[in-house]
Amino acid sequence: MNNDSLSLKLFVILSKTYRVIMEQAVKDMKRHGFSETEFAMLELLYHKGKIPMQQLSEKLLITSGGITYTADKLENKGLLRRVACPSDRRVTYAEITEEGSEMFHDVFPEHQKVIESTMTGLTDEEKREAIDLLKKLGLSAQNT
């Protein structure tokens, strides 16, 4: 197999693997009553604390309109609140509420088990190798 076809094969396999794993993860998110975007936003806020709304778009790779829509939905559910920055009126933070934090504290361990079960095809050492190789590939692709 030449280098071009090897690269294409890797691309196809990465794409299919990502799709299969994400299907399992999204199914679990929906089981808990969340869209993929809602779950990702709650997970980020749960683990990192309050974040400026503008940075959510960068961190979650979602348009600013998608961030606003998702934040509105989570705010209406009482799981997220917007907090004005006291030192800069242009900045608004998104913050998980106490109710959201308690709920996510219960949901996340179950979700983590689902993710772990999708990764049982690799040993811990193979997972470490895959992480290193995928980081290397991502950095290289970013610089092309």
Image (cartoon, rainbow, N blue to C red):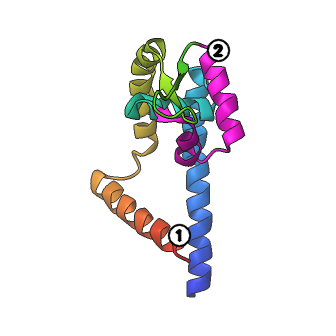
Front residue of this view, candidates 141 and 13: 141
Name which quarter of the figure residue 136 lies in.
Answer: bottom left
Q: Amino acid at mark 1?
A: Gln
Find out whether residue 67 is within the magenta segment: yes
User: Can residue 1 be seen here?
Assistant: no
Residue beneath the point at 35% across and 63% down: 132
**Drawn side of residue 73 relative to residue 112, left or right:** right
**Please, is residue 25 above or below residue 29 in the view?**
below
Residue 89 is situated, as x and y percent measured from the top left of the image, at: 56, 32
Residue beneath the point at 70% across and 30% down: 69
Magenta region: which residues? 51-77
Q: Amino acid at mark 2?
A: Asn
Residue beneath the point at 31% across and 52% down: 123
Quadrant position of the C terminus in the picture: bottom right
Res. 76 mark? 2
Front residue of this view, candidates 142 and 52: 52
User: What secondary structure do most residues of the magenta stretch adopt?
Assistant: helix
Name which quarter of the figure residue 32 lies in.
Answer: top right
CA separation, marks 1 and 2? 37 Å
